[in-house]
Structures are given as C-alpha cells and as structure tokens.
Amino acid sequence: MRRLKPRKYAQLYLMALPTVLYFLVFSIYPVIQGLYMSTQKPLLLGGGVFVGLENYRGVLKDRMFWRALSTTLQLSGGTIALGVLIPLIVAIALNELPLPRLRKFTQTIIYTPHLFSWVVVGGIWIQVLSPDGGLLNELLNLVGLQKVHFLADSMWIKPLIVLLSTWKGLGYNAVIYYAAISSLDPEVYEAATVDGASRWQKITKLTLPLLMPTVRVVFMLSAVGALRIFDQIFVLRNAATTRVIDVLMTYVYDLGMRQFNLGWATAASFMVTAVGIMTVGMLRKAMNVDQADLS
C-alpha cells in the first residue's frame, strides 16, 4: 500500500479545517449534547438526574404531543399540496405571457413575499384581516356582511395559515418551475407545432410530462421542512387559537422556553426529527424520487 503523505496535502487539509470545525462545533456537538439532555431531568439549582428514556415515554403519553402532531400533518399536507400545484400553474402561465417585460415584472411581484420574514408578512396580514379597520372586513361591510374574526376563529385559522404559507412560498417554487420550463428543448415544441398541436395540447402533452422530475423535487423540498413549521404559527397564533394551531415545533418551544422542561423539550425535538426522517423517506419512495432527480 502507498503511504499517505500529509505534508503533500497540508494546504488542502488546512483549507478543509474551518469547515470541519464548524460542523463539529455547530452540528455534531449540539446533537450529542441534546441526546445527553434528553436523558436528564434538570434540577432547579443546575445539573440533572439521569432518567434514561423516561422523557421520551412522557412525551409519548402527552396528549398535547399527539394533538400537535395531528395539526402539523394537517397544515403541512395542505401547504405541500397547494405549494406544489399552484406554483406549477403560475409558472406555466408566466411562460405563456407574450411580453418579456411583463413576464419579468410579474415574476418579481410574486417572488417578493418570499424575501420577507414571517414577522413582516404576519404583521401585514394581521392588519388586513383585523376585524377593526382591516381591509377585508371593510370590504365585507361594504356589501352588507358581518365582520369576521379570521385570526381568532378556529374555523378560519387553519385554512388561512395554509393559504398564507402557500402565498409566501409561491414565488420561490414558481421560479424553480419556470427555470425548468425554460430549459426544455424548443425543438420538441417546434415539432409539435408542425404536427398541428394546439397550445393546450403542448401544455398537457409536453410541458407537464417533462416537468414531472421537477415536480417531484419541489414536492420533496416542501416535505423536508413540513414538520418544522414554526414562524407562521408563532406569529399568527393568539389566546383564542393556540390549542387549535399548536404544532410540533411550538410544542417543543413551549416546553423548553416557557416551562423550562429541557429534558422533555429535547426528547420531543429528537422525536420530531425521527418522524420527519421517516416521513420524508416514505414520501421519497412513494414519489419514486431518485438521486438523479435531486441532483
């Protein structure tokens, strides 16, 4: 066997060292520390007592955990479904616009909400949906309808979160679809035109089938972060809807930051991670997403 020559590759090792240290300090160490904390029962004066898997068993017995899991799956399922379908429709519509300047302007407008944080977006929609002077309720008042407390009504809050999440991420996914459409071979469309295919036939028979690998990628990207939704829930929830829209990440946040039950919180966070990995794995297998699609 040939002997390694560390001196020969010393510069490469030094270049890789900051990246290795970064992952060790900010990725590997927190995971190890979190696993340790999940087996501890913190004491009031510091330190903790080893309790093994007791924290995990406590989370599994907690009704709030299962309620949060159910709510997470509902909100995530709706957001994924609309977040995959609507941007696809928008991207195809953008591609059909005849004027390039109008196409770029429209693309900029729909992408803009993605640039803002949920604090900004949530603040805007709280004002729009407010029962006192909100734009939407003022329009309802003009047509003789009663005011609706959208963000305080358990019937409205879940659909609103799904719609607002879809609206915010619309531009990002639409850009992915539009880039994929722009890279399609134009000769295929020219041949279809020669054969007398209509615009609708080109969309349904050519564009949609050719975009299926991209659809699967967008679906997987949406599913990866589905169980980690937090920002929109934290910004839009209130005393009237907290139990209705409490998700897994807000459940972990409340345990750790409000109740200071760090053992349960870290155990719950690892369980959320495990559920996420299993969910993404099953969806990847069901959608038949291979490495070529993700590359």
Image: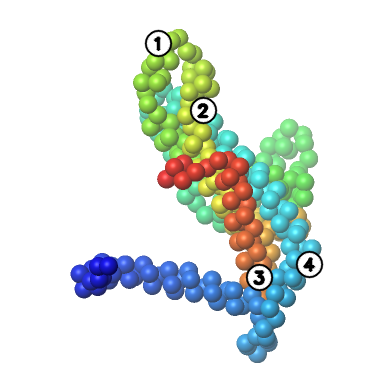
Image location of residue 124, percent across then percent down: 58, 50
Helix, strand or loop at mark 4: helix
Helix, strand or loop at mark 3: helix
| Vertical placement of residue 134 versus 100, above or below | below
Find disc 3 in the rendering and name its residue.
267
Please name whichever residue, 89 or 20, is drawn nearer the observer in this view of the structure: 20
Q: CA distance from mark 2 to mark 3?
A: 43 Å
Q: Residue at x 57, y 46 (%)?
A: 284
Q: Amino acid at mark 1?
A: Val
Label 2 environment density (alpha carbons within 10 Å; few <14, some 14–19, many ≥20) = some
Q: Kindly identify which numbered label has been placed on residue 208.
A: 2
Q: Residue at x 73, y 38 (%)?
A: 141
Find disc 1 in the rendering and name its residue.
194
Residue furthest toward the front?
A: 1
Instruction: Tell me, yes or no, whether the two marked residues, 1 and 4, touch with CB atoms within 8 Å.
Output: no
User: Is 127 on the left or on the right of 64, as rendered?
Assistant: left
Instruction: Tell me, yes or no, whether the two marked residues, 1 and 2, touch with CB atoms within 8 Å.
Output: no
Q: Is residue 9 visible?
A: yes
Image location of residue 64, percent across then percent down: 76, 63
Q: CA distance from mark 1 to mark 4?
A: 65 Å
Tally of numbered discs: 4
Instruction: Tell me, yes or no, whether the two marked residues, 1 and 3, touch with CB atoms within 8 Å.
Output: no
- Name the N-terminal-most of marks 1 and 2: 1
| Vertical placement of residue 268 versus 100, above or below | below
Q: Amino acid at mark 4?
A: Lys
